[in-house]
Image (cartoon, rainbow, N blue to C red):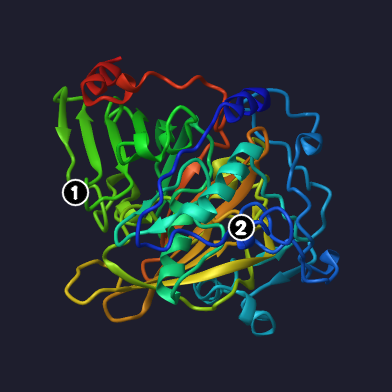
Amino acid sequence: MFKKIAVMGGALALSLSMASGVQAGVSAQQAAQLGKTLTPFGAQVKGNGKATSTGLGIPDWTGGIQRKDIPKTYTHPGQHHPDPYASDKIAFTITAQNLGKYADKVPDGVQAMLKTYPDTFKLNVYPSHRSTSAPQWVYDNTKSNATSAVLEDTGVKNVFGGIPFPELYGSNSEKAREAIWNHILRWRGIYVVRRASEVAVQRNGAYSLVTSQQEVYFRYYDPKYSFNTLDNVIFYYLSFTKAPARLAGGAVLVHETLDQKKMPRQAWGYNAGQRRVRRAPNLAYDTPIAAADGLRTADDTDMYNGSPDKYNWSLVHEKPVEMFIPYNNYKIDSADISYEQLLQQGHVNPEYARWELHRVWVVEANLKEGERHIYTKRRFYIDADSWQIAAVDQYDRRGELWRVSLAYIKNYYEVPTQWSALDTFHDLRAKRYHVQLLDNEEPSILDFSQPVPDERYFHPAALRRRGRG
């Protein structure tokens, strides 16, 4: 896989036109710091100078996980990942009882989780490892994007194949929107196949699995394209339900667009019982997801997705701040952990979760006057190294904290890319939660090694044929 990516990267050439009269990216002098004082994705290379063994230290970034760091027990694509940090010991544990000592470094929603489940929820804090890494060609594209990227009202221009805004620029609001676009367009491979389950865990701990095969083709990162040839499509998403029997055969197809005002997200559903493909024009914003039992909206998926047009955006802090977030979570999706062991009342078993101190951008979104959404305010905690959202606080129409989302991220080091091992969505009032990406009991997990299908594979006409098959 490494050799394949390197070959494709070597053939990649970006041709980006500058928008006249519009500031395009940062200066060449600023961009030159990428890979020097800044990581290739724009984070500070230097750590905070404290010992990582204490749980309060952030180390220097030295390249993240590289091929030499992959455990020898990892032998084939799609295999469950051996933990490269398995020998680490817990530095300390944050509970409801000692929260006051660490509250300035714990996201508000996580603090609420600790108070809601004071006897069972906790944060086991481990030494921090800045494991984020990506192929060199993604770094090269990111550096090109830094000087050419243009933020528009409902999208971005002149970017391709990398993080669009590794160095945020402009007003506070512009920087906040750039950070969200960095999450939406972050590196996650080119084509990936995954068989996984999702569950809604009820107040009493009961749950029922819904299992599907998901496939994503990130056209934005395919070297055969460029910004000018993307046709506003950044990825195709295809999901087929495998179980339970009453839902098996159903399918969803999404064509995700970059500027959703110019062209809204295109979505279709296949009903196996009716053998019909229908448009799904409402699969966006706060549309509830059926498999989540009302616990996840369409734009909750992947912590946040879709058009940012319903909100006013701001940075809570002008620079990244140190926060405890889920990180390097190899244990939580290990094949050695059963769903019964993992899924507890109220939240996943905290003994299998790993928390580390990292620098994060804190971005807030407040609903615009005249717009409608079940969340009037959302606060995002974005890992500065990878631009992956790690935690989200979501507020209801009364301005009260209602839901909390957590992404238990790790490095898929065979690619390499930083992504989520497990996503959870918590309703603090109902004391129910939804879990996505469960694959502990599956024979394989994310497989990045499959060849990219012909684009006709992601055409609505092919949905019925695949569903019936």
- Foreground pick, 388 / 45: 45
Residue 9 x, y percent position in the rendering: 59, 30
Residue 349 x, y percent position in the rendering: 60, 55
Q: Which mark is residue 118?
A: none
Q: Looking at the image, which residue is at 49% across and 78% down?
A: 316
**Relative to residue 80, is residue 234 drawn left or right?**
left
The residue beneath circle 1 is 282
- Foreground pick, 285 / 249: 285
Q: Looking at the image, which residue is at 33% across and 20% down?
A: 457
Q: Tell me which amino acid carries mark 1.
A: Asn
> Mark 2 falls on what kind of element?
helix
Relative to 215, does residue 204 appear above or below in the rendering?
below
Residue 161 x, y percent position in the rendering: 50, 40
- Of badges 2 and 1, nearer the viewer stands 2
Q: Is residue 314 visible?
A: no
Residue 322 x, y percent position in the rendering: 66, 72
Relative to 87, does residue 220 appear above or below in the rendering?
above
Quadrant location, the C terminus:
top left
Q: Is residue 153 visible?
A: yes
Q: What whole-number distance in Å separates the C-alpha atoms at marks 2 and 1? A: 40 Å
The 10 Å Cα crowd at callout 2, few under 14, some 14 to 19, many 20 or more, is many
- Foreground pick, 184 / 53: 184
Q: Looking at the image, which residue is at 77% across and 35% down?
A: 70
The 10 Å Cα crowd at callout 1, few under 14, some 14 to 19, many 20 or more, is few
Residue 413 position by quadrant: top right
Q: Tell me which amino acid carries mark 2.
A: Ala
- Foreground pick, 237 / 12: 12
The residue beneath circle 2 is 31
> Mark 1 falls on what kind of element?
loop
Relative to 148, does residue 323 appear above or below in the rendering?
below
